[in-house]
Amino acid sequence: MTIRWRHLLALVIILPLLGFGFAWSGLMGVGASSGHWPITNWFLHWVMRNSIRTAALSITVPSLENPELLPPAAGHFETGCAICHGSPAQGRSDAVLAMLPPPPDLKTVAPTWSDAQLFQIVKHGVRFTGMPAWPAQARDDEVWAMVAFLRKLPEMDTNAYLQASGLHGIGHAGEVSPLPITCESCHAEKRLNGNSIIPRLAGQQEAYLLNSLRAFAERQRPSGIMEVAIGALPDDSLPELASYYARQARPPRQGIPADPRLVEKGRELAEKGRPEEKLPACLSCHEKPGGNPAYPRISGQNAAYITRQLQLFHAGVRGGSSFSHLMIEVAAKLKEEDFAALAAFFASRESVGP
Ligand code: HEC
Ligand code: HEC
Ligand code: HEC
């Protein structure tokens, strides 16, 4: 009996030492050229699918029907995902196909995952494979937009993809590749309407635009989409972009359908606030003659974008410039039902001062 115990103890000590020695010797191949053995391949993929299935069990799926989720996600897909996975506008390169494991064609594999599972993969990435995590972990709404896009991807032909991602209509119709995504692919006035979750930039305060761009670049304002969009730009181009958009006239919008009672409720809050709850009037900061030029204009902005920003401020995840804490304090005092009223009021108002 004693001898058996000794043998076991020796094994427990010697086996890890042997393994360690083998790793130290450098004889273990780490080259990707020969691939994995089929059994290793099967095992790794099995582990991945199990892990994602279990993690996805606790995820609640929101409605993904809103068509406005597609444009920002499609534009981001082109810059952040297509380089590995290919897209309806470009195949996967030989260099990418030599990765171990190679990034799969998502048109084929996306339907094998549920919405919650896709969310888990896109938000957290897949360790040891090259599949990156979403750059802004603080918010989930952008990841859900990407899931909505991946659901539509299998049925998208090249044209539908070019249209959704904004590659179409910027003078490249007919040419398929290479088509760089620009700011205008997402922010062009003609692509935006009141339901857009992408903001209008034309006519916004220059100081605010510059602060926002710097906040995205420094990850003070979480947005995976905007981080990637400006990631490759040199720092000194940010003032030029801010000035370019601030100088554009914001074309007025006619006939935005809005419930007049909602607009009235929004006006009341914007002009008077709720003094009994120490909620200040929005217009005591925003668009105030002689006010701080780093405070943004809200009038004429897309209603759905305003609502989303209020939700993010309210949840405490919308960062921004060194003034953003002011807005976080205000939004903490807002109620869910205020968001739509405020958005309806500001979206239907022509941009004014300061
Ligand atoms: C640097 C390359 C790279 C980039 C960029 C990348 N991926 Fe991946 N992705 C991979 C690889 C490699 C896998 C395979 C993982 C595996 O099979 O274990 C993968 C797997 C996936 C899967 C699971 C598919 C399956 O069945 O294995 C999804 C979904 C996915 N990626 C979506 C995305 C999205 C959306 C983006 C952009 C936000 C993205 N990926 C960006 C490399 C990449
Ligand atoms: C793939 C789509 C996409 C591209 C490309 C893109 N943006 Fe954006 N942009 C967005 C989205 C979505 C938001 C909203 C982010 C949020 O929810 O915080 C945004 C927000 C912004 C804001 C903040 C505006 C505000 O009112 O707070 C600025 C400024 C901006 N973008 C400028 C740019 C510039 C300049 C470029 C080009 C270098 C660019 N964007 C490229 C999608 C895009
Ligand atoms: C105490 C001053 C102050 C008050 C009051 C205030 N805000 Fe703000 N708000 C700000 C500042 C400052 C920012 C910009 C934060 C940044 O630079 O990132 C902002 C940003 C915003 C944004 C984001 C704009 C964009 O383009 O992304 C919205 C929407 C907004 N405020 C709506 C409101 C509404 C609605 C009210 C009234 C309920 C309100 N604000 C009251 C200071 C204020």
Image (spheres, rainbow, N blue to C red):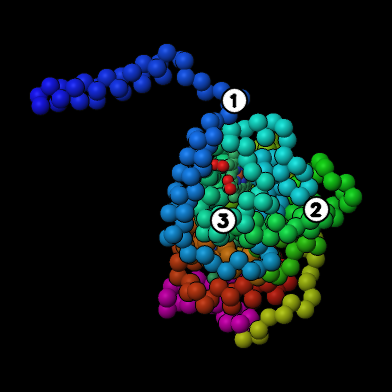
CA distance for labels 3 and 1: 29 Å
Magenta span of residues:
262-285
For label 2, the crowd category at 10 Å Cα-Cα, with few meaning under 14, some 14 to 19 and many 20 or more, is: few
Query: 161 above or below 354?
Result: above
Residue type at tag 1:
Ser
> SS at mark 1?
loop
Q: What is the three-letter code of the residue carrying label 3?
A: Trp
Spatial CA distance of label 2 from label 1 is 34 Å
Q: Which mark is residue 158?
A: 2
Earlier along the polypeptide chain: callout 2 or callout 1?
Answer: 1
Q: Is residue 142 visible?
A: no
Give the quadrant of ligand 1.
Answer: top right
Cα gap from disc 3 to disc 2, whole angstroms = 23 Å
Disc number lying in front (2 or 1): 1
Q: Which residue is mark 3?
A: 113
Q: Number of labelled discs?
A: 3
Q: Main secondary structure of the magenta part?
A: helix
- Counting from the top left corner in percent of width and height, residue 253 is at 78, 72
Asked which secondary structure carries label 3, the reply is loop
Q: Position of residue 298 (x, y in %)?
A: 65, 66
In this rendering, the label closer to the viewer, 3 or 1: 1
Tell me whether circle 2 and circle 1 mark residues in contact (CB < 8 Å): no
Q: Residues within 10 Å of mark 3 (few under 14, many from 20)?
A: some
